[in-house]
Amino acid sequence: MKRIIIFAISILFVLPTFAAKKEKVQQVDSLGRKIKTGWNFGVLPSVAFDADLGFQGGALTNIYYYGDGSQYPEYIHSIYAEAAYTTKNYGIFRVNYDSKYLIPKHRLTLDATYQPDAMCDFYGFNGYQSVYNQDFHKWKKDPNKMNVADYQSRAFYKYKRDLFRFAADIEGTIWKNIKWNAGVGVLGYMIGECDIDMLNGKHKYELGEDGKPTDSKAMNPAIEGLYEKYVNWGLIKPAEAKGGWHPYVRLGLTYDSRDQRTCPTKGIYADAFFTYTAAFGEQAAAGYNHLQFNFNFRHYVPVYRDRVTFAYRIGTQNNIAGQSPFYMNTYLNTLFIQRVMYEGLGGANSLRGIMRNRILANGFAYANVELRCKVAKFDIGRQHFYIGLAPFFDLGVITQPYELDEEALNRAYAADTDPLKLPLSSYFATVKNCWSETGSTTEDIDLTKTYFPHMAAGLGLKAAMNENFVLSVDWAMALDKQDNAKWANFYIKMGYLF
């Protein structure tokens, strides 16, 4: 792991940065930063690591145009392109354009992305109301460190999800720092069961005399994953079980007094917006046309010049009309697409250290707190760099849980003929109810678990070039093992979380 981190950071410094024409470095600004002008090309391997997605390899480029430098560190144009794939069968194919000058006095962002994901995380509905059992999918080489009888498959908490996204967003000024926002786009989800034969490849699933798979990398093709169980039990409806295409329109307001976008050292950013998402055919008949409301507040408080900044973000996303299919509740709406994926909640893009998509509900709220410290600044050639540290704390809660029909679930569970099924308490947090009509002790789903907060903490290492190109290495740990039993969760990404 250390070698991966050192290699990724060194890439940022060692690779050359090219200019389309000879650039001139102007005078320093009020904070002592040397001003960039002209074109700036950053060409890098797309090297990253994510505790949920694995090691990533590919290529990316980010092209900035600063003009005469009068607006530095703001850029005039930014063009970003990336093609990459991870060791856990997750792909990124993306082109993004961002500018405040193509349309005078308006910010325009265009994004086209395709993300194949052969093993997307699915841990059930309503956070802690769904039980996470590490032994179901974690095979350990030492059988003394695990309960062999509990092992299901490495794909037990997975399903297949391919996502296509196109977005066009524009922002204009109403008065000073108050902006209006509008956007249109389409999200296309293609989902289903994991393709176990494809994932196994040459790793054939067979059991040896000791009851262990002869190849620990193989996945059990005979076991139903949690996604299949939810479909069979009716928790995932037929109209949403295979995905769908959803055009959307978005309207909102923002207030933005930040001194820059990539790494603000002071100011406030706040937005409030509505997103109406359409559905077609069977999905429209099932009521999956829906309206969501998002609120986001970020505050950047300077502690010591631009060297130390206290930054925090709070936000919420809620369904206010119609129903959203379960797979869209893993998506965190945003006014501008700045990173490849906005997962909500859990994972590198929302709650670091907590498993990706651990908190799946109709509505949720979240908070992130960071203390950003630039510990060293230096130049290499004409490029300006800094190294930073950022301890952080992340928190998420459910505001709109799924309403589970326990009677229907019990009937579906009783009718399930899977000979390997376990008690319902293996999948749902339950409480004893001694006042049942039959007088016997029963287990009911524990609704109080729904609203327990999910928390994680960690430390970030930042390596930045010219203020806008930032390599981020975060380590995080969930504070409850139901959110992640691992303590070593690393994420190597581009940019700050917010």
Image (cartoon, rainbow, N blue to C red):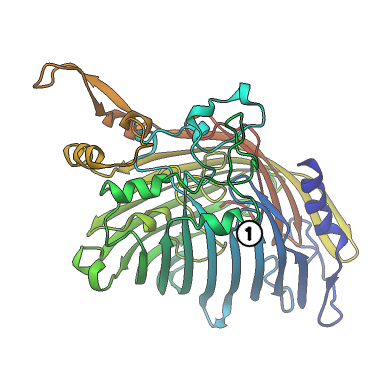
Residue at the disc numbered 1:
262
Q: Is residue 354 visible?
A: yes
In depth, the one of 319 and 147 nearer the eye is: 147
Q: Is residue 30 above or below residue 220?
A: below
Amino acid carrying label 1: it is Thr
- Where residue 422 sits: x, y (%)? 36, 32
In the displayed structure image, the side of residue 112 where residue 227 appears, left or right: left
In the displayed structure image, the side of residue 492 where residue 147 appears, left or right: left
- Where residue 386 sits: x, y (%)? 78, 52
Q: In the orientation shown, which residue stands out farthest toward the left? A: 437
In depth, the one of 185 and 260 nearer the eye is: 185
- Where residue 298 sits: x, y (%)? 50, 50
Q: Is residue 348 above or below residue 79?
A: above
Residue 25: image quadrant is bottom right
In the displayed structure image, the side of residue 157 where residue 8 appears, left or right: right
In depth, the one of 342 and 264 nearer the eye is: 342
Residue 443: image quadrant is top left
Residue plotted at (88% across, 60% down): 14
Q: In the orientation shown, which residue stands out farthest toward the front? A: 209
Residues packed near mark 1 inside 10 Å, few (<14), some (14 to 19) or many (20 plus): some
Q: Is residue 118 above or below residue 369?
A: below
Q: In the rendered image, which quarter contains the N terminus? A: top right
Residue plotted at (28% across, 70% down): 279
Count of all numbered marks drawn on residues in the image: 1
In depth, the one of 128 and 373 nearer the eye is: 128
Q: Is residue 74 visible?
A: no
| Disc 1, SS | loop
- Where residue 384 sits: x, y (%)? 82, 60
